[in-house]
Image (cartoon, rainbow, N blue to C red):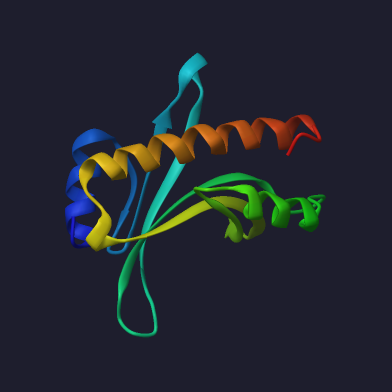
Amino acid sequence: MRHFEAVRSHVGSQYALRQNDPYLISFDLALPLGRHQGIYLAELEDESGRRYLRLSTPIGPLAGTDPRRCLRFNWEQRTGFLAVADLDGSPFLHLCENRPYEFLDSGELERLIGELGLLGDQLEQIIASGGDSF
């Protein structure tokens, strides 16, 4: 997968797209126990023109979240990092991963979607319950 249109084609053949914009698509990933996690895919470009695919999933509102815990989480993770993005005008924590297209194939894309979806759902449940294991 060398560009966003290849990603769109693959993802569109596997999932029902909720959002289908030029450089942003989203869908709901079905998880065990009837749960679902929203997954967002977008194209990013760095200063040198290199393009990346960003995968992200919202996990909870930023309000009330300890930034030190977020930084500790980022330090300990091997895949994914926490970032803040607006969701319906409110700051929301997202679990993200950026991958250059040249190292991305359909198997790796599906692996990342599954891994981020499951981890995002676990983090969302922890945040929603007010747990401290995050």
Residue 88 in sight from this viewpoint: no
Name which residue lies at 56% across and 46% down.
58
Q: Quadrant of the N terminus?
A: bottom left
Name which residue lies at 51% across and 23% down.
35
Q: Is residue 107 above or below residue 95?
A: above
Q: Position of residue 100 (x, y in %)?
A: 32, 63
Residue 36 in sight from this viewpoint: yes
Disc tally is 0
Answer with the quarter of the image where residue 123 lies.
Answer: top right
For this orientation, the residue located farthest to the bottom is 48
Q: Position of residue 65 (x, y in %)?
A: 78, 50
Q: Quadrant of the C terminus?
A: top right
Whether residue 82 sits left or right of residue 29 in the image: it is: right
Q: Position of residue 48 (x, y in %)?
A: 34, 85
Whether residue 93 sits left or right of residue 120 in the image: it is: right
Name which residue lies at 21% across and 48% down.
105
For this orientation, the residue located farthest to the top is 33
Whether residue 108 sits left or right of residue 58 in the image: it is: left
